[in-house]
Image (cartoon, rainbow, N blue to C red):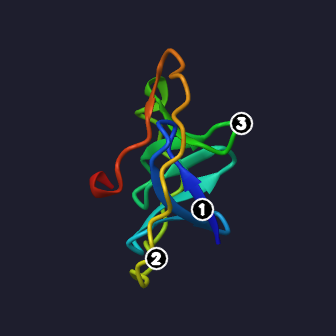
Amino acid sequence: MKWTWTWSGKSFGYWDGEDLWTHLGKHVGRRVGDHIHAPNGRYIGEVMGNERLATNKAKAGEIGPIYLRCATRTSQPCLSDDAAHPRYPGFDDFPHPDEL
């Protein structure tokens, strides 16, 4: 289990292998290279060079592999937020877990 944060520094959840989970135990994404896709294949974001999560607006329509969402797991304590990074042009912060 490797914890991860959004570009703005919000604690998001964790990686278990290539699968992205919220701290509430919801399986929301799968990593394919640097891209993260929802179970329906929709691009939801990517892992930037510093391992933070962000969304490239130009890639919003991309479709990747479709997969079955895993069953919800037990919630984990949310880690503290971290410092935000300056936003790159063309990028938004990764969606909030409630949006996925």
Residue identified by numbered label 1: 3
**Mark 3: few, some, or many residues within 10 Å (few <14, many ≥20)?**
few
**Residue 7's spot in the image, x, y percent?**
52, 37
Q: Residue at x 48, y 18 (%)?
A: 90
Q: Earlier in the sequence, mark 2 or mark 1?
A: 1
Q: Residue at x 64, y 52 (%)?
A: 32
Q: Earlier in the sequence, mark 3 or mark 2?
A: 3
- Residue 88, placed above or below residue 69: above
**51 displayed left or right of 71:** right
Task: Please count the marks in the image.
Answer: 3
The kind of residue tagged 2 is: Gln
Closer to us: 17 or 68 = 17
The kind of residue tagged 3 is: Gly
| Distance between the alpha carbons at the discs numbered 2 and 1 | 11 Å
Which mark's residue is nearer the viewer, 3 or 2? 2
Q: Residue at x 43, y 83 (%)?
A: 73
Judged from the image, the secondary structure of the residue bearing numbered disc 3 is loop
| Distance between the alpha carbons at the discs numbered 3 and 2 | 25 Å
**Dots 1 and 3: beta carbons under 8 Å?**
no
**Mark 1: few, some, or many residues within 10 Å (few <14, many ≥20)?**
some
**Residue 43's spot in the image, x, y percent?**
46, 43
Residue identified by numbered label 2: 76
Judged from the image, the secondary structure of the residue bearing numbered disc 2 is loop
| Disc sitting over residue 49 in the figure | 3
The kind of residue tagged 1 is: Trp
